Amino acid sequence: PNSRGGERREARERVRQHQHSSRRLSALLHGPTLGRTEAQMSRNSAIDCRDCASSEREHATCSLKMKMPKKISLTHALVVLLIGTILAPALSFADYTSVSAFQCHRLHHFSNRLPTQLHVVADDTGEPILTRAQRVLQQDAPPFDPQFDANLRSIFPRAINNGEFATRVVQALDRRGGFSASNTLLTTSLCSDELARQLADDFSAIYGNGFNLGGLAGFPFAGNMGFQTMCGHIPDGGGCLLLYGPHVGVTADGVIGKVEREGVSQDDICCRSSIEALNFVTGQTNTGVADFAFTDLQQGAVQNMVAPLSDRLMASQHPMGELPFAIFDTQNELIESIVREGIGGVKGRGIAILGGVQINTAPKYLDYFQPMRFDLLDNSGQLMEDLLPELLT
């Protein structure tokens, strides 16, 4: 009897292992709808099982009977057990390899999207950086319009079109020790407006992806922490080019503070953030930000920065023309404070600080930039050279 009891237990164990393999196969082939628990299978099979009168726990071991003939040959049983024994490790391995292959595919796909260097633009072509600048700045740029250029420069006498401006900047830095595409981190503090981003895109095409400090109206909202973080991204032995300033729109017929936009039928305010702030602090409108709610935190700060400028602007004969320069003076003070606080983190060649006013125009014209400052500082904050005269000649 003891021998027969042991044989029964062994048979039950073999059947249980086979059931486990069968359930794994069903779940794999047919999805989670067949992935029932043993208790569910026991309850369901209890209805149809003709031979089991044991408890529910023990009944789970004979649930295979409802799918088999009442009398089964030993040969058939051995074949079933043999198949189950072979399939069990195979299914486990199949699960593992299928997941591994999927993960490897995802990792391979993701790795193809990762840059191999900090910058998009590499120096391994051997192309001189000035040649590269001239080449990329000519791509898709509107043609130079002498008449519009003369009209705009009558309003902004020291303005330079973006293509010529960027070329002069690259040339000046290259002469001072080689600010190249691979060792220079471009950093910008420009307005969030897509028109203002064109200048950043022009310089990114030369120096590679940049670090953004700016927000509405071009104020450096990333602050001290943003600057310190940026310093850690400067390539070893390299330097930083910091480009900052507000922007203003000029229409084709010379209206300051408005601009034609692609796909927009009417002229639009530019820069809206600074103009709305000015109108609010001078009492012309009540559409400003009354408090510093998080959802309008930047505009509240712009209003706070513009408020002290109201007397200067109201005394001007051309407030819209004076506004970007007044804002630049405020931003310049902020940039000086931020740089002074974090200059110790600047590596290698130091930092070139380039500030001024962006002038955005209609899509058919070139944009312009009026430089106000171009200083080359070492990593102790000492002025090594004032490069502004070189840009203006």
Image (spheres, rainbow, N blue to C red):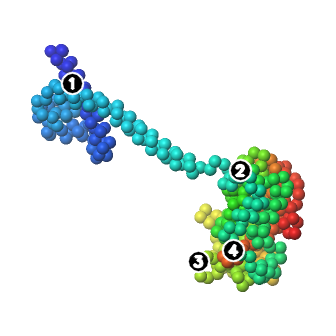
Amino acid type, residue under disc 4 in the picture: Pro
Amino acid type, residue under disc 2 in the picture: Asp
What label sits on residue 142 in the rendered view? 4
Foreground of the two, 351 or 269: 351
Q: Which of marks 4 and 1 is nearer the N terminus?
A: 1
The residue that appears at 13% across and 29% down in the rendered structure is 72
Foreground of the two, 300 or 155: 155
Q: Quadrant of residue 57?
A: top left
Q: Position of residue 243 (x, y in %)?
A: 75, 61
Q: Nearer the viewer, mark 1 or mark 2?
A: 2
Q: In which quarter of the image is residue 142?
A: bottom right
Q: Which of marks 4 and 1 is in front?
A: 4
Circles 1 and 3, Cβ within 8 Å, touching? The answer is no
**Position of residue 121 in the picture relative to residue 76 (left or right):** right
Which part of the image, by quadrant, shows the C terminus? bottom right
The residue that appears at 61% across and 82% down in the rendered structure is 266
As helix, strand or loop, the secondary structure at mark 3 comes to loop
What label sits on residue 316 in the rendered view? none
Mark 2 surroundings: few (<14), some (14-19) or many (≥20) residues within 10 A: few
> Which residue is disc 3 drawn over?
263
Residue 170 visible to the viewer: yes
Q: Earlier in the sequence, mark 4 or mark 3?
A: 4
> Which residue is disc 2 drawn over?
124
As helix, strand or loop, the secondary structure at mark 2 comes to loop
Give the distance between the C-alpha atoms of the residues marked 4 and 3, in whole angstroms: 17 Å
Give the distance between the C-alpha atoms of the residues marked 1 and 3, in whole angstroms: 79 Å
**Position of residue 178 in the picture relative to residue 8 (left or right):** right
Amino acid type, residue under disc 1 in the picture: Ala
Q: Which of marks 4 and 3 is in front?
A: 4
Give the distance between the C-alpha atoms of the residues marked 4 and 2, in whole angstroms: 30 Å
Give the distance between the C-alpha atoms of the residues marked 1 and 2, in whole angstroms: 71 Å
